[in-house]
Amino acid sequence: MENIQIHGAEVIIKGVPAAPGIAIGPVYLYSKQAVRAHRKPIEAGEVGPEIERLRGAVVKAEKELRKIVEFAQQKLDPDDTKILEAQIMILGDAILMGTIEKRIRAELENAEFIVFDEISKYKRLMLSAQDEYMHERAHDVDDVMNRIMRNIQDQKLVSRLEGEAVIVSETLTPADTIIFSRNKILGYATDLGGVTSHAAILSRALKIPAVVGLRTVTRHVHSGDLVAMDGYSGVLIVRPSDETIQMLHRKASRFKEFEERLTEIVGLSAETLDHKHIELSANIEFSEEIPFLREQGSAGIGLFRTEGLLIGRTSVPSEDEQYEEYSAITNETFPHTVIFRVFDVGGDKLAPGSFHEENPFLGWRGIRVLLDREELFLTQLRALLRASTRRNVRLMFPMISTVEEIRRARRLVTRAQAELDSRKLAYDPGIKIGVMIEVPSAAMMADRIAAEVDFLSIGTNDLIQYLLAVDRDNTAVAPLYQQFDPAVLKTIKMIIDAGHQRNVWVGMCGEMAGDPLATILLVGLGLDEFSVIPSVLPEIKKIIRSVKFKQAKRIAEKAIGMTSPEEIRSYLSSIIKDQIPDIPLEP
Ligand code: PEP
Ligand code: MG
């Protein structure tokens, strides 16, 4: 594969940088389907529990197989169930199991590895025979091995994650990212995914370095292998040399120094050298992030992704539960404002229904779900309205593609208000309502949409994928996902101008707002608000404070006249290098 280079003992794999930072440590290979052996030395005192675990796993595997046999006997030919019975016999093979236990004691290695090693030997022997029947039986042996190993792993999943590790996986869902982040995770590396996949956004928010789109990383590592990951340039190195490790340590400290210097500007406002004030706020999904964003100097929250409330639950939280959550957030943020985006389910986020969608990004997503599930929407609206009494709450609708959707959503807000009136519950009657512009049809209609709302917020993550027809999660087309495509810039300009014509402020809460390379351009296009992940807040503020609005306008005009993303990128990076050389840009 062209994204892999071999350099001495090192395997260097190039992917997409998804969250900045350097991570050096052992791999934990996270696999939902395939079972793999994780080799780990054990202490003499751990032998007893390890053998207990092995025996427990064998008993469980046998029970599972007996259940399947029972079921199969009703449905299958008796001949076919013989294969399963043969598997049960392997589990009961005293010699094989005795050898495995003996090896655990003698070699002081974990049960799953010895199971893997011993049964693989058995399997190789069978495969080397010139007999088709024996080859078939080798697959049975494989099945048995996987079954035992999976059962051992299930019992050990929690304890294995107690150490520090770089999680390597084919793909990570937002829920995986959150669950893992509760452990000591050094970094994430995945085969699939793009920079704006939801899990990548979460890694950045959680300040965990991540590289995605590595294509085959899961096939090049085993659990326990040492890897070095560079989340700035999007590279993962398997078995890094001492030299590479030192180089990455130096890089990490260079970036850290830069970040420390930025703390000086935390308390300052985001305004240009010629005093144009820009609203700089944060994107968050969990209330746990609020103290961090305050440390980073954010005035308010420009995007609170409420669908985070639904992760890991089987039912939607009640109005009261939601109210508690939202009001805790508004109280903590007061006197600054919070823009709550109503549940944006579907697409790459939580599936809204149990049915399969061929193309979820073009499917039942965002406002479409909420307009179809009025009760779900009304419950959330009532909870949000009840949390708005301090008048620092704004509402935002995701995935708007027509004016009519806004009208229908607003009618439901009015209905939720009437319901609260009848219950004599207070809310902010003048609550401001805005929409995300993230679908090309909404961008085209931005002027008429602006007439219906109080603000617009550009969601570039989705807007770019729909505009350029490039799935934001698809590795195969990741290089085509270009936020500096001239078509993107023209569309952003059109939206900002349309909002301003209607005296409506225009913000951006897509990841582009947090890209230091885009800051001057966006200031120059007249963007009023930047909502970014908390980790990049000081850097973006520093750039805003280093330019004049007049100059930024000229730069934006020049950039928008160019014809390729490469040209635009190199123009913008030359300006940063000249004018704000201490911003560490990545190629
Ligand atoms: C966007 O699409 O730009 C956005 C901010 O929404 P999300 O990433 O949650 O889809
Ligand atoms: Mg979106």
Image (cartoon, rainbow, N blue to C red):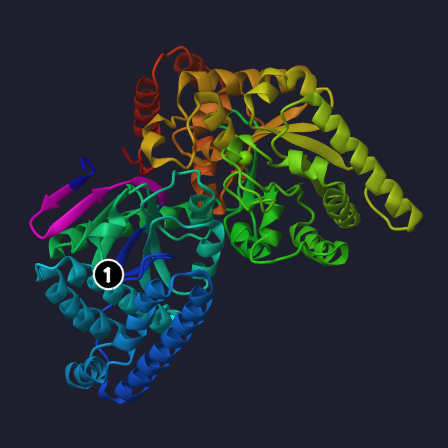
**319 on left or right of 396:** right
Residue underneath mark 1: 139
User: x%, y% of residue 470?
Assistant: 41, 27
* Mark 1 crowdedness (10 Å alpha carbons): few <14, some 14-19, many ≥20: some
User: x%, y% of residue 275?
Assistant: 55, 27
**554 on left or right of 337:** left
Locate ligand 2 by image quadrant.
top right
Q: Is 500 in front, or is 205?
A: 205
Q: Is 537 in front, or is 447?
A: 447
Name the image quarter holding residue 38: bottom left
Q: Secondary structure at mark 1?
A: helix
User: Can residue 356 be seen in the rendering of this structure?
Assistant: yes
User: Can residue 547 be seen in the rendering of this structure?
Assistant: no
**What is the three-letter code of the residue carrying label 1?**
His
**273 on left or right of 7:** right
- In the image, what residue occupies the spot 55% across and 15% down? 494
- In the image, what residue occupies the spot 33% across and 82% down? 55
Name the image quarter holding residue 582: top left
User: x%, y% of residue 485?
Assistant: 40, 20
Can you say which quadrant of the picture contains the C terminus? top left
- In the image, what residue occupies the spot 61% across and 53% down? 310
| Residue 252 falls within the magenta-colored stretch | no
Magenta residues (range): 5-19
| Residue 17 falls within the magenta-colored stretch | yes
> Taken as a whole, is the magenta stretch helix, strand or loop?
strand
